Image (cartoon, helix red, strand yellow):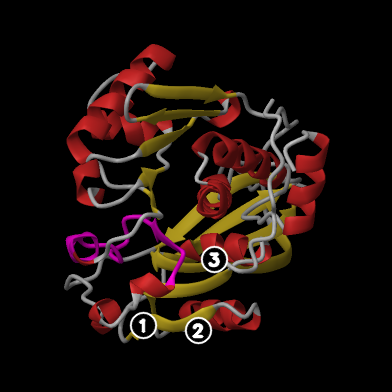
Amino acid sequence: MLSFKMDLDFSNLKVLLIGDFMIDKYVHGSSKRMSPEAPVPVFIPKKSFFSPGGAGNVAMNLNSLGASVSCVGFVGNDKNGLELINFLKKENIDCKNIQIIEGYNTTAKTRFILNDKQVLRVDEEEELINPWAPSSIKNLKCNFYDIIIFSDYNKGALNSNWFKNIEGNNIFVDPKKDDFSFYSNANIITPNLNELKKASKIEINNNKSLIKACKQIIECSKFDYIIAKKGDEGITIVGKENFVKHIKAHQVESPDVTGAGDTVVSALSLAYAKTKDIEKSAELANAAASIVVDKIGTATVNIDELKNLSKKLNIA
């Protein structure tokens, strides 16, 4: 446990968020009988709702932690896309650089919940016919922002032009592509173990192999740090000059990990922009993740929740 005190007022931080915006839908229902047509329960919907997903969930987390957020990405000119933008706008999140594309269907993930357990997920998504080239890319005044976050869900919002044209000291990436050299101008990336394994082509089965994979990637792509997300095993930080730190996860009964990575990159980036201390920032991100995995579905952590837990852990 760290013995530092951190100022958790992030209200003066401005974040530029670039990524894949999508919508997460939830349908809760019940079942009293099995179908006569197949060995499956007859699902009776009771209630449904949606929340921003992908980069939208990152925006919601940043906003609930008190930062100012400006978004860059695209959605389709459909019900899902327009509902998503309206939802974000009501939270005072800047959406003027989210492009609405005619003829494109906004990515949507619908989860069916039976007796508090997910029994089915239906994904609606399509690949862009032409690579997305936003007109706003050259007009963004990146120096205006304290933090730049790339939230990559591999749906077409991120292309190499971003990383050729954007520079800064606080560039974070939550990666999805198999080749991490794509993100070479970034400072910090936050992959999970499966993403690390694909990018490094190293079988990761313990901390030794994890560190080897991270060091190989850092040497090739020149990142300052890799924040490796290990689920219920916590987080490992690997940086230049053989910096390594393992942070244990906080135990949560029956965790729901949906969107937890979005919370990690949000809390990590805000804390690091204030402290420039990667260990302190990862400890705070780890605490934030423990809060959201204790909630059902795509969730956010708010600043009061984070302050209360941080106080208990003696980190704020």
Front residue (pair 255, 280)? 280
Mark number, residue 82: 2
Would you name the residue on which mark 1 appears? Answer: 99
Q: CA distance from mark 1 to mark 3?
A: 16 Å
Q: Which of marks 1 and 2 precedes in the sequence?
A: 2
* Residue type marked 2: Leu
* Residue type marked 3: Ala
Q: CA distance from mark 2 to mark 1?
A: 11 Å
Would residue 154 be counted in the magenta stretch? yes
- Mark 3 falls on what kind of element? helix
**For the point 50% across and 38% down, which residue is it?**
278
Q: Quadrant of the C terminus?
A: top right
Q: Is residue 242 above or below residue 128?
A: above
Q: Quadrant of the N terminus?
A: top right
* Residue type marked 1: Gln
**For the point 73% across and 57% down, which residue is it?**
303
Give, as a single range, the part of the protein colored magenta. 145-164
Would you name the residue on which mark 3 appears? Answer: 59
Residue 123: x, y in percent?
44, 58
Residue 315: x, y in percent?
72, 37
Dot 2, crowdedness within 10 Å: few (<14), some or many (≥20)?
some
Q: CA distance from mark 2 to mark 3?
A: 16 Å
How many numbered tags mark residues here? 3
Front residue (pair 46, 251)? 251
Dot 3, crowdedness within 10 Å: few (<14), some or many (≥20)?
many
Does residue 63 show up?
yes
Check whether the beta carbons of the residues at disc 2 and disc 3 lie within 8 A of each other. Answer: no
Residue 212: x, y in percent?
30, 19
Does residue 31 show up?
no
Mark number, residue 9: none
**For the point 71% across and 30% down, which residue is it?**
3
